[in-house]
Amino acid sequence: MIEHVDDGAQTSTLGAVVAPTVGWASGPLGAVQAAAREIARLTAVQARAVAAFAASRPASVDRQQGERGAMSAERWAARAEVLRAVSEWATAELAIAVNLTQQAAEALLSESLTLVHRLPGTLAALERGVVHRGHLWHLIDKVAPVADAGLRAEIEADLLAWLARRNRVTSPAQLGDKARRVVARRDAAAAARRLAKAIQERGVYLRPERAEGMAAVTVVCTMPEARALHAALSSYADALADEDGGARRTRGQRMVDALVDLVLRPGETELPPVRVLLGVVASMGTLLGGDAPGEVDGQLIPAEMVRQLVHGLAGRGVVLPDHEARALADAADAADAADPAEAGQPAGVAWQEAEQAELGAWWDQVEARLLAGGLEEPDWPPEDLSGQRWTDTAGALDPDPLDPDALPPDGADGRERRGDPGGAPDIQPPASGSGTPPERCPADGWWAAADRAVEDAGAAVHAAGLALGHARRSVRTAQAAAAAQEAGWRAGPGGRVDAAPDALTALAAAADGQRQALAELLAATAGGGLADRPRIVLADAVTGAFRTLTDLPALRRAGHCGAAACRRAPDACGHDLTGRPGLRGAGPTGAYRPGAALDRHVRARDRRCRFPGCRRPVTWAGELDHARPHAAGGPTSAANLAGYCTGDHRGKHQAPGWTHTLGPDGTLTVTTPTGLTAVTEPPPY
């Protein structure tokens, strides 16, 4: 049971629960908040209990891969990694216990084990009510796969601290966006691997809907493709008119009708061509070859994809060189220079020979252990046992002839090793002129059967050793290639650009050809897929806060102070340029509606609806609203405008008891009728 107390604290019988970031509400809404935190705490209790149950059902009781009746290789490979140590029958047992399908029970098992073993900080935050169940999916999906345990813990701690900020509303979508950015920045290699795997899963899927006779077609594709497809269908839907007297269709229904007409009846429709608008955001470093991700309509996409998209839309090929092959060649040259003894040899010869030598020594030791009986460690050096065999010189038989442990010690019953100077040979030379090959003595006795069994076992062990050596070599080759590729990239233009702390340093680190290609890209308009010249965001290098929106021609004009007395070259003027046009924010507009430059400025600053927790974009379709009404003397300026989606814009004016306060820097403070306070700021770049 949870008790609500007046001093803003909350206690439970099983542990402390922290207050919401926006404070405690009074009345029924406060009870809702308390219930939400109790649900989160019980979710954590359930996760720990499920993990304890899984530990009591180890996979060792199942039939192993390769055994008759075991789980198929396809199903085993498709299981989550955290389930590999859990019996496959634990899923069915859990499903029966909590009335779930087996698919849902397996998902619950995977989620619980991931929280307990890979995200302990998230589990603790869930117990305290800092996060709720809706937040878990993004942390499990994006943070848990980070392989390095230390890095994973740091990312988890950073995200949880960011989520617990005071007076902030953090929806699951916002947390997911933040997690994508942090993981892409701090674990770019893992993000690239996940993207490559996801791209292989592109496709179109069909599933029945809940209502009889209905179905859903799901298209899984890259974010730019999906955004462009959705925007095109939206434009087609807007162009479709309902028939007079006919049923009124929603926008979604018109989009479906347009899609069916375009796909199933191409050429039979009168739908006009449409233009698709995509808002693509990429940093200077990304365009120059860095690893920083970009955005398409506010959705995160990897650096390489945004480069391909931007250059493709501008009607230009990708101008950045491929550094991977050059990095591998440079690494090979460096290795040759570091070890002259290996110079001139094919790549990898030296370490392969060393691996073969290591494998040979390992096999000699295994053979010696087999011959010593029971795979016990021999008292002599393994290399002294090459080619030795046991023989029976006394003709005596053991009570259990096939039990290696029953063999007497060396020499106790007359048995000696081949090659022992004091013993008799186990193979007699053939008589002169005889064509009969030599035989073991005795030829059909128990020792011959044991010797054959040892040889068969040795052959199997030898084959396993060869396979193991091949696997080791493959892993080493992959590791060497990955290290060489990473080192080459870091030493190349892309790595230097990525390591730059700001855009100016990145430009200085780039090659002349890269800077020229970037200038041509920023000056491009029309011709390709661009309807307008690319815009350039000037942001604070430390905080990422938006400052102004400009373009390349404006930057070139602003690169000189403009004073008639200035004798410096335009590209070398070092005077204060703060007030130059193109470097300061867009000025106010005298009319109610903002001018084109001010409209672009505010939309670029806000990008998404400013209402706490809302994620709808305002880049193209959002609405700009005056914080102080224009009719009451409020100016049409950046300091008095904020972007909203249509629904939240209506709520600002119509919802009773709500107040919206906009600060000069764009900070929006929203207060609810029950006194809760939430703050949003323009998202940083």
Image (cartoon, rainbow, N blue to C red):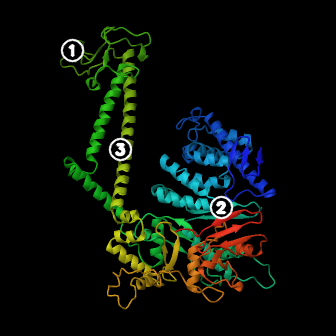
- The residue pinned by badge 1 equals 421
Give the CA distance from mark 3 to mark 1. 40 Å
Kind of residue sitting beneath label 3: Arg
* Mark 2 and mark 1 residues within 8 Å of each other at the beta carbon: no
* Mark 3 and mark 1 residues within 8 Å of each other at the beta carbon: no
Residue found at the far bottom of this picture: 564
Position of residue 71 relative to residue 388, above or below, is below
Q: In this orientation, which residue lies closer to the viewer: 158 or 445?
A: 158
Q: In this orientation, which residue lies closer to the viewer: 531 or 582?
A: 582
Q: Residues within 10 Å of mark 3 (few under 14, many from 20)?
A: some
Local secondary structure at mark 1: loop
Q: Residue 676's image quarter?
A: bottom right
Local secondary structure at mark 3: helix
Q: In this orientation, which residue lies closer to the viewer: 676 or 187?
A: 676
On the picture, is 295 further left or further right than 355?
right
- The residue pinned by badge 3 equals 473
On the picture, is 353 further left or further right than 376?
left
- The residue pinned by badge 2 equals 167
Sooner in the amino-acid sequence: mark 2 or mark 3:
2
Sooner in the amino-acid sequence: mark 2 or mark 1:
2
Q: Residue at x 27, y 54 (%)?
A: 332
Sooner in the amino-acid sequence: mark 3 or mark 1:
1
Kind of residue sitting beneath label 1: Pro
Give the CA distance from mark 2 to mark 3. 55 Å
Kind of residue sitting beneath label 2: Asn
Q: In this orientation, which residue lies closer to the viewer: 424 or 318?
A: 318
